[in-house]
Structures are given as C-alpha cells and as structure tokens.
Image (tube, rainbow, N blue to C red):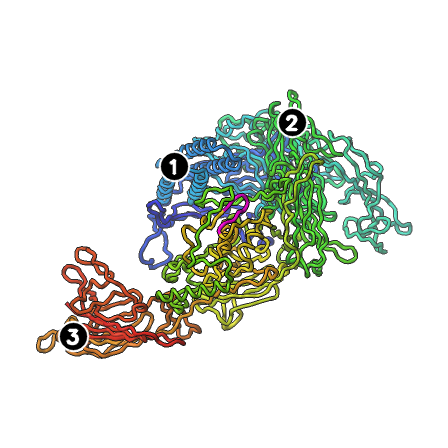
C-alpha cells in the first residue's frame, strides 16, 4: 500500500504548495509469505489486505497520478494512450545492483526441529521460490542449532561466516535515496544534540559551559544543514515533477532552519529556547525525510527451518545503500548491525520469545562498485566453494551403496536433493577458476551431541519386552524414545567431564503402572496405555539417570575443538529428516559434503555454475544429448584469528516490574544473553522490585572479531526478566537491551563501570527498569584482568566500586488510610494492614479495625532507619503490600504497588531545637523590612471602618445607614438589587465589561478565575498532595472478571532525610509530629455550579440539553427538571448543599448529562474531586479567602472562622509562634512587624461593609501566604468511553465547612440572572423632509409615506398607516407601536426564546442588544415599495435628540464621517433606561450616496417616550412620536419617558 506525502498545501513562510501528484514511479506491494496456502489462509489473510506489515514481496505497479482542477471526466476509466506508454518507457531503465551480506552470528534461535538457514532477497531476486530468474547465492548453508546452555540455541558457524550475494536490476533512484539518507542523518544528529543539551541542564553545568555548548551545537547544525542535497543527473537519472516540487520544498525548509539557527545563535537568552528550537528543527527534518517515490524494494531476510519460513526482518533499501560520497551512504551500509527477527503477522513483542538475533553486515550498491565491499573486509578473507553432496543408502544385504533403487535422489546432489551435481559436471564460471581438488568438508554442527551446552543432563533409555504365548513377558531389548535400537542401560557410561548423580531409576511420573510399564499391541504402532489388556503383545518402561558436568572445560566445546570425524558422513532415517553425525540402528540414509575452492580472476563477475548433465536418467539406456543446469556456490567470510573475551554483567536491581502472579507479586529472575552464551541470576521471591546484587561472569567467550571492531560496534546484550513458576513455563515480564563497555588496554581496566537504568519493555509499553552495568574485557596474555568480585556462597556480588555508596537515612511513613478497596475472593476488605519495604527493611502498620467505620489507621506514622544509596539515581523503590486480616488466620495479599522515584519526598532534617523553618514572603510591600516592634498608628476613617468594639449587628446597622446615605446621592436599594449581584462580581473578574455595570467603580472585590482545576492552578498547590499522596493499588495479574487491575487507593506520604552516621547521636525531630485527627469528620459541603463551556454535542442537531448530577457516597442530586435546552455553553447557577462524612464519603463526582425525552439520558462528561485532600492540604482549599473582610453586602464573609482564627491555626500547623497584635492596626508574625498601612494605602478601602481592622490585617497576611483565594475553577470533563478526550469544561467551586469549627456563613446566591418582561410603546406622529420618490399625474414630486418599526429577533414588523401624496415631505401620523420583550437589566441584553423548528421540543435562547429599528418607506400599489431611510437606536446608547428639525443632521449619528474623512464633534449620548424622558429630532440615513460619495440625510424624525414607555417616532417632516416602556413586575410603574424622532430630507 502507498503511504506517502504527494502534495503540499504550502507553509507559513509564504512558499507555494502543489496539488497531489505522483510518478511515473513504481509502487512495491507486500503481503503474506509466498508459501501461502488455503490451510493457513486465515492467519495471513490480513497481510494481503494491508493490515500489519507485509512480510514478503508480492510485486510492483507503475503509477502516475496528476490532479487537474475543473470538471470531472466523462468516463471514469479510460485506456492509456500509446503516447503515454512510450513516455513511460524512459522511467523503466534498469541498472545492475549487487547485494552482499555477511552473517557473523545467529543466536537466540527458537527453531530447532530442522536445520536452519537464512535467505536474503530484494524483490524477487534471491527468493528460492522464483525459478524464472538466474539463481544466486542467496541462502546460507543449513545448520543444526546447538543449545547455548540455558534457554536458547545458536548456529555454530565458527570461523567461516556464511555470506550471500544477490544480483538484481532496478531503476537508478539514487538521488532520491541519498537525499533521504542525508536528511535522516541530520535528524539523528539533531536528536543527539538535543539529548546533549538536556543532559547539560540536568547536570546543572555552569552557564558559561552551557553557552559555549549551545554555540558549538548551533554552528554544527548550520554546517550540516548547509550541505546541498543530491540532484538528479539527466544522463543518469529520470526525475519527474514531484521530484522537483519535493526538492524545492526541502530546500526552502532547510534554508529557513539555517536562517533561524543563525538568528538563534545571536539572540538566544536561555538554554530552554535553544532546546525548544532544536526539537522543532528535528521534527521538521523528520517530516522532510519522507520519500514518496521510493521504488527500490526492501531487503527481506527469512529464517527457514526445513521447508518452513519461521521469522523475517524487513530492511529499507536506502539504509544499506552505498554511495560514492560517505555522507550520502545509508546509516547501516557495510556496518555491523544487530537485527531481531519477528514472526509473520506479529510485531516484535517483548512478551514473546525472540525468534532469532542476527549480527551481520549488509551492503547494497551498483554492481560496478562491488569491489568497495571486498576492500572493506579487512578482518577476513572472502572465500567461495563449489559444493555437492554424496548420497548413500543402506541395504541389509549390501550395506551402504549409491545404487539403491529406492534412495529417492541422485548420487551427487545439492543439499536439498533437487539438483544433480556430479563433481565432473561443474564448469568453471566465466572469470573464475578452481584452486585445488575436491575435499570432504564436514558440517560442524553435526558434531554436537544432544547434551552439548548442558550443565545437567537426564539420560534415558527404554526397556522393551514382548509377550511370549504360554511363557509370559520376556525377550528384553533396549531402545530410545523413537524405538530405535539403543545400548542397554548398564553399558551406558558418562562422557568425559561428566559424573553420575544417582543410579538408574524407573520413571514413574508418567501414565504407567506401579512398576513403570506401559502397554501396546505393537511397538511400532504406539498407543501405549497404563493398564494391561489380554491383547497387548509388548510393553516398555523408561529408565532415567541424571549426570552433571564436573569439568566446564568440556562443556559444549562450541568451536574448532569440537570437530566431527574425518569421514564427514551425516546419518538420518530419511533424506527429509534431521541429520546427525552418529550412525544409529534405524538410520538408512547418509550423506557427506564436498567442497572445492574457487578464486575470482575478473572482479565483479557472478560465480554461477553451468552444470552439464546427460539427458537420460541413470537407469535409462538413452545416452543422447546433454542438459545444462545452473547452480550457485557457497560463500564464506573466513576469519582466521580467534579472540577471547570476558563479559561481566553487574545485575544490581530492578524496579516497577509487572506482576506475574494473581497475588500481585512476582518471583523474578533475569536471563542475560550475549552472543551464544546465556546465564541467569538467582530468583527473588514475592517482589516487584528485586535486588539481585549479582555479577554474572561469561569468562570464556570465543569470538572471531577483533577487539578494534568490537569496540566500535559491540554485540548487543539481551536481558529478559521472567517470573518463576513452580509448575509450567516461566512468564515473560519484559525485555531490555544494552551494549557493554568494551575494555581493551590496561588503562581501560582501571575505569569502573557505572550502573545505569535500562528500560524494560513489555507488551508494547514499559514494564519497569533495570539497574545494571556491563563490561566486556579483551583477554590477552599481556594484560591481567581485574580481580573477580567477592563471592556470596556460589554467587558473585557486584564489586564495591560499582555498587552504590550507602548512607544512613531516616524514612518517615505517613500511612493515613485506604480508600475504595475492591472485594477480594468475594469478600470485602475490612481489616487491612500495610507493609512498607525498601531493600531489606520492613515496617508494618497496625491492623485497621473496620474500613466501613473508619478507613484511616489509628497510628499512621511509621519510621525506618535504613541504609540506602546517597545518589537518588540508585535509590531502590518503596514496595507497598496491603494484606487483609481474615478469619482462621488468613492474610491474603489484596493490593500492592512500587513507588520508584522517591526524590520528591527527600527533605532536610528538622533542627534539634524544634524551631520552624517556615519563611514568610512579604515581598512587594512598600514598607521596609522591620525587625523591630515599632508600630505606626493610622487614623481610621469613620465613614468606612467601624470601631473594633462594635458588634456585627452594629456593623450591619451602620452599613444600612451608609446605604441610606448613598441612596440620597442617587443609589437606590432597587438599583443594587438589579445591578449588583454575584454575577456582577463574576463578570468583573472575567473582564466582560458589558455585563457587570458599575461594580468595579463602587470598589467591590473580584475573585480568581482559573482556566484549569484548582489543584493545578498554581505550581505550589501540587495537586493538594502536600499532606499525603493517593497511590493506586494493583492486584498484579488482572483477574478475568475485573475490568481494571486497580483494586483500591492508599493515602500515604514519606519524608526522607539523612541521619547522623553515629547511632549514639540524638535523632532529629520528626516531620509528621503535628497531624489532624484521623477520625471521621462531618462536614457541610456546598457545590456551586456556574456554567459549562464547549460541551460535546449529543443530539442530532449538534447541540445538547445538559443538566447537572452531583453524587457523593450514596447521596445523589440532580437538576433534570431544570435542564438547559439546545446549548453547548449553558449557564447553570446551581447550588448543592449537603452533609458528608469524610473520609467515608470523600469522592465528589459531578456529571453533566444530556436530557433525552425518549430513551436514557447520555453522559456528556464527568469530573471527580477528592474532598479529603482539600481538607488536609496546608493550602486550605476548604473555602477561598476573599480580598476583604466584609460582614454584610454582596461579598459577605462566609468562612466558619474569622481571619484571626485562621491565622492562628496556620501558625500552629507550621510550628510558628502565634501572631502578636498591637492594637487594631499592627501585628508581629515570625520576625516581621506589619501594619494595616502596608496593605491599605493612605485611606481604607473604598468598599463598604468592611469589618474590623485587625481582622482585615490578618486577612491581608493570610492572602500573602500560599493559601487558596476566593476563586472559580474550570474542571475538564471526561467520558469513560473516551477517557483521553476532553468533553468540555465546567466552571464551579466547592466550599467545605467541618461542623466542629462552627456554623458557616450564609451561602452565596449564584442563581442565574432571569430576564424580566418589558413593553416598549412607540407612537409615530409626523415626519418631515421626506425624500419625494415619485411624480404625480400633474408632474409634481410626491411620496406615499409610512413608517415601519421592530426590535431585533422579533419576526413581526409593525407599520403605520400611509400618508398619501405628501408634496413637501411631511407625513402626519398618530400611530402606536407596542413591543413585548424579555430584558436583563444587569447585562443590558434582550433575551429571545424561539423554537428553531416547529417540531422542536424546546426553545433556543438567543441574546441580542436592545436596539429599535425605524424605517421610512414609500408605498406603491403596483410595484414593490421604495425604501427611503432608516434609523437604528441602541436604547442604552442613543444620540441625544435635536430640539428642532433645523438642528437635526447626520452629525447626531455616532458613525457619521464628514466629507474628506474629517470626523465631526462627538454628540452627546443618552440611555432611555436612565434618561427617563427624551424628546426631539433624529436623522434617518439613506443608503444612497451623493456625487461626493457621502451618505445623504433622507428624513428627520422626532420621538417621545413615557415610562410605561410611551414612545413616539416623529416625523419625516415634522411629526411627534410618543412611546412607553413598561416593566412588568410586582412593583408599580414609576416614571415616564417621552421620546420624539424627527426625520427631514434634503
């Protein structure tokens, strides 16, 4: 399938994009294996459909794509014109390519049933199944896999490393692939530079060093980016239009990077800016490094066992492509790389075993550069052999012979037996010649016995007996498991270097009788059973005896020392079965391999043999004619030198492993594989963070690669973590990869290795971390290896120079309680106990009495005196296990977790004096730091500040008197009720000036509006986890009936600080010394829901009908009866007040639900608030602190405690001395003396209703601390179905009042503003100077005038009667318009409720400004009426009317501009709602322009209004219009507003 970018919309730098286009270019197709059959079709069918990675090349298609704007073609499918076919031929030119590969090692092999070989192909070239192409040496020789001593197998290639060569022909697209290589290398460099900069920041290097590093890196980036990309050479390449566009796009983007990096080098002020820009550069280069027209197929490597394709690997061709310029070569061209094969249809999963690990070199280039590959093989010799196999069969009367009629293959053949290859048939290929004669070349893998690589081996043999009629069981014989004749048990001896562990014993762990016999009718038929029957004629029993390798020198002998006999015969039952080197009783066929060396006389020629054979078979008498067949030689890279190495794997610990058992823990051990060697650590019981502290020594590693080559690219180490199971196979917990630090010289030996954390991957995600180090020593006679580590029993410890340095440390554990524990084994968790362990240190909490009565522990503080590493990098995790105490002494594990990173919990120890280390931050005050107790007295303004001796009731009375005083100055109580409410405060805080009136002008306070959750609003809030964190408990391996492995929560925290090295010194005071009560607390909870924004639509209309559901514990509240119809941004204004018992009811869940008339309601989103964290946090998130202390008014104090009491509590919680007050205006806290004047400048606040001065001073101090202020938070809503996608946000806040502190203040009234019904009455009287639009029969100009008026949003437009035949532009009316509307005075907005469709269940609310529209029309009977002029008046901001028609002009309109662009003097504006009575003339404007391009005055109109609004539009000419605005409510009408309009024409 084609996945590429073939178009560009253009970029932000002004460069043009291009429409989709492609080719002419080939597109390669990949799918299932070529051996695909109907039997396994379902397994691989998805690969042919593009689902997953195709594992085999299936063909290619030549495609050209172009996009043309315009009409669609008449015929969707047409034949390609012959001219286009001829044009395409130039894009089909081919060149010869050659693919080389040298296999250095094949380890971790998972297929052992048959010999293993590897096939490498590119396209169809090299595929054994394709018989139409010239054969090539694309496969390695079949080799038996040998056990590596622990788990996997390997192929013993020794010093002859198999090589393959594949010749192919492809289009020359090197200009595309070389550009791709350069971009990929640039992206990799940018990634390295970014990591280098981040490492410098993490290590906190000096600024000078970081600056020089940044400059150096930017210079290198500019230099690398300045290298030109390759261009198509006309005589060599064939570029198309897409190539041109892509090249131009790349050049423009890279030029921008160079320009930006140059500017950044000169102007960068912080390293964070450089890192951010580098990341952007890297992302941009990766986007450019996409080649849409890559017609070169991928290189595919297959592992084949017998006739089955087991695993594969796909390598993009450009990664191994050779170029004459080094910077354009592929990243892996000719270099040693490690590949991990994968099963077809499956990704490389860390939960599956590795099919095979390959270490090889691959080179792809034009055939003319073939010599470049050979010259690069400096560490060995490339040798080529002609190969044939001699085949024989055993006949009882004859013995071994080549003339057996049933042999099934030729006397001489290839390894598969398909080709006849007699020695004499081989003809020297052109450019090659033979060296020497044919010789026997035994396959080295045949010499390994079945016990090779084992440390312990179980020898077994079967004793067979037959039933003799009339006698019974007798005629004993011995055989192996297959029934082949075998040596008797008494004749079997232990091999050299082995010793028997015990004597021969009958295996009774099978389906046998008490004596170990199993019975069958006939041994060759099988079907053995444990019960003897009368018809059974044979029986057998298995004898076993284990032996142990006592001399490791004899273990495995995996190299040249382990050679087969000189005859070279390989034996098997049949030719299609696995061969072995020992002749067995049942073997009837054998073969041996012959080689003859060849050398090249002409470099670059392909060594393909032409074998000339007779046309007839061996048994035929027809000798006429010859048949020519093609065969390929075997190629090897001969590495004569043998080097020895020693690997030391320092396995210290792992953390955060996945649980392998249902109990929530694992029994982990690590298995380390390096080349063809494997070892495992010891097993650690019941933990997710094991500490092995073990060194694995691979002391005799034989390798044919020189230390210089190994140092550049050392072999990769695979570390696999398993969970041990007593029964069955171990479970894979994850896999990590590492490369050893190679040490060659004595100076290298002196450097200690450093432990590093390696990521363990599992199931596509992270499965923990491994702390380990790996050293690979080159063993030589000249340099002495470092001493081996100390032993602990039979195991080696990690050396002291590598093991982390330990320090005596104190760990305080606050084990507060458990929450939301799920049932375990169908029973509730009621009496948990928590066990904390770090390393070998363990602390346990007390047993909880009953989680249903109190989920907190009675004594929550635990203490550990431990030795842990000084460096945080090496600190072991804190392992937590929760057990439930149940009847009959059962203590099942119900939850566990591992806290890996403890850095956030480290702190300094408290001073022995017990003094607090808390520091107050009063920066920003004008007063200097006063450490003395000098207090400045400030005069208290009597009008605003009440006496400290007065009671709250007196304060209320004085506030009322002030209100009365202000009402005499023009402010009324009714006006306050309409204009000043909580929503005024909210909109003033949001900055919506049109909706809060004069709230700020009156000096009232605002609140904080957070655009996120309260716990995330400030960095120092830190999720309100300062008292304790909430840890999610896991059960381990998820049970089938559970949807999630989360089984509960643990409230806990830690304090980690250094302790004196001398145990006799005094211990510092504990941090968790002042704790709140752990008993349940009954609290009053008030939830204020303000509004929701950007909700996810749930209805087909694209809207929703949301309402609120609040749930805590078993309590549930909702507003379903008051849902908000047809909106995604509802304004709720709901208050929910209830009582909650915390911590029994700690999780507050708020849902926004969509109301549906039919069916169940849909959940839009929900948010969860932890009320307990808000009570326990030191930031006091129970009730926000307002800006001022007011006893009454719109900002009345609602906390249960006064500011002074809150300040005292804060000091007690932080071990601070209580504040000392100096009168009412000063206090001392800590070492600082503060006055009220430091906060309230010159005079007291202008706001009314202020409380006592000392309380205000305490409040000002509190607001300087990191406490929660009065606020509105915005909480994101999420739906469990789409947990990662935000469904909107909810504006709200929560107040929590513990009842033990006393009753709280009154709740805040946040009821949403409701519109009130108003009536506008507008009377039209006269018009003047109306434009005369028509001509009468007598030739006089005239107009038939009428007036039309309406309010926005109202469909009905009201009209006056028609004033016929006005000859002077004057119209006389006595007509009244009456408009009904809903209005919100505080927001000055008109609310319209209207159904969008007649079938809509609810009306949709729309808000518009109160504007009156007036239009003047000329009535026509036989045509459309003519428009003469219009006037729009904002009832809140309208121009003051003129007193006469002569004074009325367009200058009254606010948007009118004089000729030549001059602005006229501003006209006075009035409000109908404030003016009460308005009378005068207004101009109506025409939409036509005069000759100078200016708008003309069409009409003058005069209006008059009354308070029940008697309004009048008046005239086009001179006329009077009176109107009334009536507010319908429970109160009576108060005043009248008269308003006149006059409209006169020019």
Query: Distance from label 2 to label 1 (Cα)?
Result: 54 Å
Q: Residues within 10 Å of mark 3 (few under 14, many from 20)?
A: many
Residue 72 coordinates in the image, percent (x, y): 33, 58
Mark 3 or mark 1, which is nearer to you?
3
Query: Distance from label 3 to label 1 (Cα)?
Result: 72 Å
Q: Which residue is mark 2?
A: 644
Q: Residues within 10 Å of mark 1 (few under 14, many from 20)?
A: few
Q: SS of the residue at dot 3?
A: loop
Mark 2 or mark 1, which is nearer to you?
1
Q: Which residue is mark 1?
A: 267
- Magenta-drawn segment: 1225-1233
Q: SS of the residue at dot 2?
A: strand
Residue 406 coordinates in the image, percent (x, y): 68, 43
Residue 603 coordinates in the image, percent (x, y): 49, 27
Please check the rendered image and state whether residue 1232 is part of the magenta-colored stretch, yes or no.
yes
Sequence order check, earlier mark of 3 and 2: 2
Q: Could one spot residue 404 in this view of the protein?
A: no
1014 relative to 751, above or below: below
Residue at left offset 27%, top offset 70%: 1413
Residue at left offset 62%, top offset 41%: 910
Closest to the observer: 788 or 229? Answer: 788
Cβ atoms under marks 3 and 1 closer than 8 Å: no
The count of marks equals 3
Please check the rendered image and state whether residue 1401 is part of the magenta-colored stretch, yes or no.
no
Q: Magenta part mainly helix, strand or loop?
A: strand
Residue 596 coordinates in the image, percent (x, y): 60, 28
Q: SS of the residue at dot 1?
A: helix
- Residue 1370 tag number: 3
């Amino acid at each position: 399938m084609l996945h590429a970018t073939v178009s560009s919309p253009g970029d932000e730098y002004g460069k043009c994009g291009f429409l989709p286009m492609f080719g002419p270019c080939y597109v390669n197709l990949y799918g299932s294996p070529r051996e695909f059959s109907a039997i396994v079709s379902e397994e691989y069918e998805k690969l042919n459909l593009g689902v997953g990675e195709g594992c085999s090349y299936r063909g290619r298609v030549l495609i050209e794509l172009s996009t043309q704007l315009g009409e669609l073609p008449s015929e969707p499918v047409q034949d390609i014109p012959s001219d286009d076919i001829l044009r395409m031929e130039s894009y089909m030119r081919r060149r010869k390519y050659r693919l080389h590969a040298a296999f250095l090692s094949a380890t971790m092999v998972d297929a052992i049933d048959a010999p293993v070989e590897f096939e490498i192909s590119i396209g169809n070239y090299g595929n054994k199944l394709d018989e139409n192409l010239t054969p090539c040496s694309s496969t390695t020789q079949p080799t038996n896999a040998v056990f590596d001593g622990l788990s996997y197998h390997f192929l013993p290639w020794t010093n002859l490393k198999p090589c393959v060569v594949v010749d192919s022909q492809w289009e020359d697209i090197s200009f595309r692939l070389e550009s791709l290589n350069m971009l990929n290398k640039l992206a990799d460099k940018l990634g390295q530079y970014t990591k280098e900069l981040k490492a410098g920041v993490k290590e906190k290097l000096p600024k000078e060093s970081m600056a020089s590093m940044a400059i150096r890196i930017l210079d290198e980036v500019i230099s690398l980016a300045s290298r030109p990309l390759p261009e198509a050479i006309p005589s060599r390449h064939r570029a198309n239009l897409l190539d041109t566009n892509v090249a131009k796009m790349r050049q423009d983007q890279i030029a921008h990077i160079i320009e930006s990096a140059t500017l950044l080098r000169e102007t960068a002020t912080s390293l964070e800016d450089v890192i951010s820009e580098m990341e952007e550069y890297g992302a941009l280069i990766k986007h450019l490094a996409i080649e849409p027209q890559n017609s070169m197929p991928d290189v595919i490597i297959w592992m084949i066992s017998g006739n089955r394709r087991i695993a594969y690997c796909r390598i993009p061709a450009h990664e191994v492509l050779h170029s004459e310029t080094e910077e354009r070569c592929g990243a892996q061209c000719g270099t040693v790389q490690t590949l991990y094969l994968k099963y077809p249809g499956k990704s490389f999963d860390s939960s599956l075993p590795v099919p095979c690990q390959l270490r090889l070199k691959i080179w792809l280039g034009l055939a003319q550069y073939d010599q470049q590959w050979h010259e690069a093989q400096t560490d060995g010799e490339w040798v080529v052999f002609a190969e044939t196999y001699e085949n024989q069969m055993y006949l009882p009367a004859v013995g071994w012979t080549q003339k057996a009629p049933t042999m099934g293959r030729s006397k001489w053949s290839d390894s598969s037996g398909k080709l006849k290859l007699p020695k004499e048939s081989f003809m020297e290929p052109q450019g090659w010649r033979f060296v020497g004669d044919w010789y026997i070349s035994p396959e080295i893998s045949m010499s390994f016995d079945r016990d090779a690589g084992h440390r312990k081996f179980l020898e077994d043999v079967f004793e067979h007996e037959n039933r003799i009629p009339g006698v019974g069981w007798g005629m004993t014989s011995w055989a192996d498991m297959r029934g082949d004749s075998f040596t008797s048990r008494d004749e079997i001896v232990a091999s050299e270097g082995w010793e028997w562990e015990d004597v021969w014993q009958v295996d009774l762990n099978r389906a046998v009788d008490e004596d170990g016999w199993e019975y069958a009718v006939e041994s060759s038929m099988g079907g053995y059973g444990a019960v003897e029957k009368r018809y059974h004629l044979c029986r057998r029993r298995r004898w076993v005896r284990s032996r142990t390798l006592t001399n490791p020198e004899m273990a495995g002998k995996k190299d040249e020392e382990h050679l087969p006999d000189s005859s070279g015969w390989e034996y098997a039952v049949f030719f299609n079965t696995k061969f072995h080197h020992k002749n067995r009783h049942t073997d009837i066929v054998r073969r041996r391999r012959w080689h003859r060396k060849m050398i090249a006389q002409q470099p670059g020629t392909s060594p393909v043999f032409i074998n000339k054979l007779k046309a007839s078979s061996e048994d035929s008498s027809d000798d006429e004619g010859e048949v020519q067949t093609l065969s390929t030689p075997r190629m090897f890279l001969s590495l004569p030198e043998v080097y020895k190495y020693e690997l030391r794997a320092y396995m210290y610990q792992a953390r955060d492993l996945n649980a392998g058992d249902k109990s929530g823990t694992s029994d982990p051990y690590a298995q380390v594989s390096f080349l063809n060697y494997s070892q495992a650590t010891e097993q650690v019981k019941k933990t997710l963070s094991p500490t092995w502290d073990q060194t694995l020594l691979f002391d005799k590693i034989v390798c044919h690669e020189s230390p210089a080559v190994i140092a550049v690219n050392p072999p990769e180490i695979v570390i696999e973590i398993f969970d041990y199971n007593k029964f069955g196979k171990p479970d894979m917990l994850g896999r990590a990869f590492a490369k050893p630090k190679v040490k060659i010289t004595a100076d290298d030996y002196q450097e200690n290795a450093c432990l590093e954390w390696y990521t363990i991957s599992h199931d596509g995600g992270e499965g923990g971390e491994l702390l380990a180090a790996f050293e690979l020593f080159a063993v030589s006679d000249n340099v002495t290896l470092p001493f081996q580590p100390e032993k602990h029993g039979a195991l080696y410890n990690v050396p002291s120079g590598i093991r982390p340095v330990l320090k005596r440390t104190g760990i305080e554990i606050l084990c507060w309680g458990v929450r939301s524990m799920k049932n375990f084994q169908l029973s509730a968790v009621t009496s948990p106990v928590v066990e904390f362990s770090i390393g070998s240190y363990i602390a346990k909490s007390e047993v909880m009495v009953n989680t249903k009565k109190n989920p907190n522990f009675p004594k929550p503080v635990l203490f550990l005196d431990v030795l842990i590493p000084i460096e945080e990098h090496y600190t072991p995790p804190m392992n937590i296990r929760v057990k439930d105490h149940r009847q009959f002494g059962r203590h099942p594990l119900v939850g566990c977790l591992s806290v890996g990173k403890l850095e956030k919990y480290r702190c300094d120890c408290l001073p022995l004096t017990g003094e607090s280390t808390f520091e107050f931050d009063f920066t920003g005050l004008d007063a200097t730091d006063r450490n003395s107790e000098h207090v400045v007295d400030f005069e208290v303004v009597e009008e605003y500040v009440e006496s400290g001796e007065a009671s709250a009731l007196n304060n209320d009375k004085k506030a009322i008197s002030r209100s009365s005083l202000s009402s005499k100055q023009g402010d009324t109580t009714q006006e306050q009720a309409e204009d000043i409410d909580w929503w005024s405060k909210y909109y003033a805080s949001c900055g919506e000036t049109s909706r809060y009136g004069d709230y700020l002008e009156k000096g009232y306070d605002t609140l904080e509006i957070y655009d996120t959750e309260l716990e995330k609003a400030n960095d120092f809030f830190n999720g309100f986890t300062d008292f304790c964190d909430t840890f999610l408990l896991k059960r381990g391996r998820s049970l089938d009936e559970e949807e999630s492995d989360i089984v509960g929560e643990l409230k806990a925290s830690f304090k980690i600080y250094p302790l004196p090295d001398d145990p006799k010194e005094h211990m510092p005071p504990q941090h968790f010394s002042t704790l709140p009560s752990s008993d349940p607390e009954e609290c009053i909870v008030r939830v204020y829901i303000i509004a929701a924004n950007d909700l996810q639509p749930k209805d087909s209309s694209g809207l929703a009908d949301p309402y609120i559901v609040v749930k805590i514990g078993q309590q549930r509240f909702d507003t379903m009866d008051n849902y908000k119809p047809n909106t995604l941004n509802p304004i709720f204004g709901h208050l929910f007040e209830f009582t909650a018992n915390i911590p029994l009811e700690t999780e507050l869940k708020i849902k926004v639900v969509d109301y549906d008339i039919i069916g169940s309601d849909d959940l839009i989103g929900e948010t969860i608030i932890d009320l307990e964290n808000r009570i326990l946090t030191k930031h006091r998130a129970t009730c926000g602190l307002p800006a001022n202390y007011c006893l009454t008014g719109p900002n009345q104090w609602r906390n249960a405690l006064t500011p002074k009491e809150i300040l005292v509590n804060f000091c007690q919680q932080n071990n601070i001395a209580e504040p000392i007050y100096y009168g009412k205006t000063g206090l001392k806290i800590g070492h600082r003396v503060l006055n009220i004047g430091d906060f309230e400048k010159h005079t007291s606040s202008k706001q009314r209703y202020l409380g006592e001065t000392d309380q205000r001073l305490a409040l000002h101090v509190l607001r300087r601390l990191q406490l929660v202020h009065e606020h509105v938070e915005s909480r994101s809503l999420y739906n469990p179905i789409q947990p990662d996608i935000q469904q909107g946000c909810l504006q709200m806040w929560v107040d929590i009042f513990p009842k033990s502190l006393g009753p709280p203040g009154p709740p805040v009234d946040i009821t949403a503003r409701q519109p009130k019904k108003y009536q506008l009455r507008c009377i039209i009287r006269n018009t003047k100077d109306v434009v005369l639009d028509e001509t009468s029969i007598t030739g006089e100009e005239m107009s038939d005038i009428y007036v039309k008026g309406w309010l926005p949003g109202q469909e009905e437009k009201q009209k006056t009667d028609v004033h016929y035949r006005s000859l002077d532009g004057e119209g006389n009316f006595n007509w009244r318009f009456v408009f009904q509307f809903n209005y919100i005075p505080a927001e000055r907005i008109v609310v319209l409720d209207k159904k969008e469709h007649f079938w809509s269940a609810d009306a949709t609310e729309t808000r518009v400004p109160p504007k009156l529209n007036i239009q003047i029309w000329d009535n026509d009977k036989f045509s459309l009426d003519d428009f003469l002029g219009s006037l729009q008046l904002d009832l809140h901001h309208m121009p003051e009317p003129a007193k006469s028609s002569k004074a009325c002009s367009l200058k009254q309109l606010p948007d009118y501009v004089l000729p030549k662009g001059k602005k006229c003097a501003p006209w006075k504006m009035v409000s109908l709602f404030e003016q009460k009575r308005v009378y005068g003339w207004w101009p109506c404007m025409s939409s036509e322009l005069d000759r100078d391009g200016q708008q003309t005055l069409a009409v003058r109109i005069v209006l008059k209004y009354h308070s029940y609004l008697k309004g009048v539009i008046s005239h086009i000419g001179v006329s009077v219009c009176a109107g009334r605005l009536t507010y319908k409510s429970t109160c009576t009408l108060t005043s009248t507003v008269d308003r006149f309009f006059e409209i006169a024409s020019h």
